Amino acid sequence: MFVRSWIGLGLAREIVFLPLQHDPMISAPTLFVDSDAIAANWLLLDSWHRAAGGRACGAAVKADAYGVGLNLAAPVLFEVGCRHFFTATIDEAIVLRKLLPEAWISVLNGLTPALAEKNIVPVLNSLGDIERWRRFAYEAEEQVSAVLHVDTGMARLGLDAREFLHLAAHPELLSGISLDFVMTHLVAAEVPQAAQNTDQTVRFRTIEATFPGTRTSLANSAGIFLGARFVSDLARPGYALYGGNPTPGHKNPMRSVIRLAAPVIQVRDIPVGASVGYNATWVATRKTRVATLGIGYADGILRAASGRLVARHRGVRIKQIGRISMDLMTFDVTEHPDIGPGSILNLLDDTITIETMAKAAETSGYEILTSLGKRYRRVLEHGYRGA
Ligand SMILES: *Cc1c(COP(=O)(O)O)cnc(C)c1O
């Protein structure tokens, strides 16, 4: 094990690198992030997109790289060849700019003149945004970059059909603005048969034709797997980079990126009829050995999943029992006498996936990732391939 400082990248926090297959002693809940898997996932998405006729592949790194840790993920992505990054907010983009001085960075929602001096490119979502950015360019007496977002069905952000027609009829509204990309966002890319996918590509091709010569950006993670009609100059995957399955219902083509491990802090034996946890939702029907982990819903283990989670210890699955509380959760380890204080349980790994946990909490893997707690130690690990 060696410790390397990323101060050179403008990052104050130290990152611990661990060698392949190493299961270290940990004394607190720890999120292991596999840098090789992130790199492999980006390379796979990039090659899929190119094979279908696309050009570059970028990365959505909003919400602290989907909860995985922006300071861990972004340098890995840049190193493997990713040059285009999307954040949701201006503050995220400013943090990213410090990490990656050379990258092209765009903010999906937020427009302020301060972006230009940090070389951050805003996404223009309305005629109002266009007007503000044009005025800024005029006052600054320079050409400013932007991405133009046209709504083709999501109805959240982006120029609606009426605004788009207005812009098409008045191209001078964009004077002083150089469009790096024109983009849209897919509503249901993870459902290949969804009618919206076709509708949106048809609309997007019209939009593309209105701005000849301007590069395009279309697919998210799942969109990359939809084939040639969904290619563009720049794909914007997020979820799949971090190990999420972009092809629900099919085998996950991505490599598992995170492993969440926590030590058992206490073990006790309880008699038949005794209950475990708040509101006594679980009652022992046999003499039971209970192991407690110091991790709970304050760490993103959603309370809604209470009684439905599993953990893994040396390849064996163990059932979670009772309510998940803020900082603690409990497991039935009656049949696992080798588990005691200090034993390490995996709550997420390559077999207990973010989708497994999402199902237990009746939510999406996206929410599991972005809920990942701030209290974990985050450790960048090379080449983790299962416990
Ligand atoms: C979040 C986001 C993405 C990435 O989507 P994934 O499904 O995570 O790949 C791409 N484009 C936009 C506009 C987004 O908001």
Image (cartoon, helix red, strand yellow):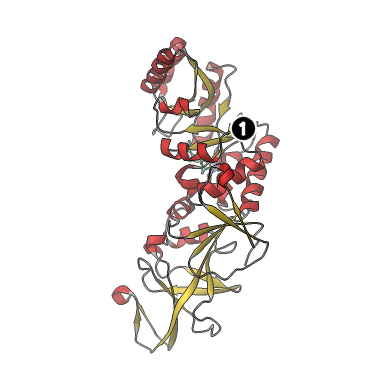
Q: Residue 206, position in %: x, y?
A: 53, 21
Q: Residue 234, position in %: x, y?
A: 59, 31
Quarter location, residue 80? top right
Residue sitting nearer the eye, 50 or 380: 380
Q: Residue at x 47, y 47 (%)?
A: 64
Residue sitting nearer the eye, 90 or 128: 90
| Looking at the image, residue 369 lies above or below residue 387 | above
Q: Residue at x 56, y 18 (%)?
A: 209
The mark tally for this picture is 1
The answer to whether residue 40 is left or right of residue 73 is right
Label 1 sits on residue: 231
SS under mark 1: loop
The answer to whether residue 66 is seen in the rendering is yes
Residue sitting nearer the eye, 313 or 275: 313
Quarter location, residue 331? bottom left
Q: Residue 285, position in %: x, y?
A: 40, 85
